[in-house]
Image (tube, rainbow, N blue to C red):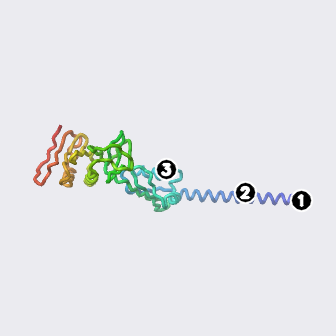
Amino acid sequence: MKRMKNKYKRFTFKRRILMSAAALFILTAAALAFVLVHFRVTEVEVIGNHHYTEDEIKAMILKDSFMDNSLLLDLKYRSKSIDDIPFIESMDVEVLGADSIRIMVYEKTLAGCVTYLGDYMYFDREGIVVESASEATDGVPEITGLCFGSVQLYKKLPVENEDIFKEIMNLTQLLEKYEIAADKIYFDLNMNVTLYFGQARVRLGNGNRIDEKIMQLSAIVPSIEGKKGQLDMSELNENTKTLTFEPD
């Protein structure tokens, strides 16, 4: 009889343990399901991106398993920026709510690129090569006419006249301001500039009246796209009445 009682007690004890474990499992599963559903990111705001599309930026942040969860994203990026992506200085992730986040993108300032051994080498306003790629990227013009030797990442392009970088940055900023997308920018030995739009060339000459030239060019570019020839704006001044595109 005593053995039966002890056996019953052991059975009851084990059953309680199993029931407690089952209850704990159910509670844990329910809590996990709540976290996965309630904190699932469905709204993503991307700010500051130009080189990459919104979908590409989202994929970079939400690519890992369960990284579409705002709690996990907050834990991972609360005090950490992302800084190992080409063409991007850093990215910050801010959790706005249980289902929404904001991604702040800080892109590297690119003045232009040069080709070297089959690759495109992108440099900043100071001439430092910050990225390399096998394909050209939209919005960053190729700079031609520069004379340099070897090119190394994170070092300045070894050109003779480093003032060229200020000219390049000033020109590319003006082109961006007036929403002009040149394929190539050519500098001759005297720092005279020629812009290329496919097979159409626009001679700008030196830096004189460059702001005015680019402003006027913004209205001209649509009419010369797809054409082959040259527009000479190098002698543009207050007395210039007309500008003529000369076909090749």
Q: Quadrant of the rendered structure where residue 3 is? A: bottom right
Q: Looking at the picture, tell me which residue is in the foreground, 9 or 57.
A: 57
Instruction: Give the answer, above or below, for where 221 lies relative to 44.
Output: above
Q: Which residue lies under the disc numbered 1?
A: 1
Q: Which of marks 3 and 1 is nearer the N terminus?
A: 1
Q: Residues within 10 Å of mark 1 (few under 14, many from 20)?
A: few
Q: What element carries label 2?
A: helix
In three-dimensional space, the C-alpha distance between marks 3 and 1, rounded to whole angstroms, equals 63 Å
Horizontal placement of 219 versus 45: left or right? left
Q: Residue at x 69, y 57 (%)?
A: 22
Q: Residue furthest right?
A: 1
Considering only order in the chain, which callout, 1 or 2, is on the residue closer to the N terminus?
Answer: 1
Between the C-alphas of marks 2 and 1, the distance is 26 Å
| 197 displayed left or right of 14 | left
Q: Mark 3 points at which residue?
A: 63
Q: Which amino acid does label 3 sit on?
A: Lys
Mark 3 or 1, which is nearer the eye?
Answer: 3
- Residue that label 2 marks: 18
**Residue at point 18% right, 42% down?**
230
Q: What residue type is labelled 1?
A: Met
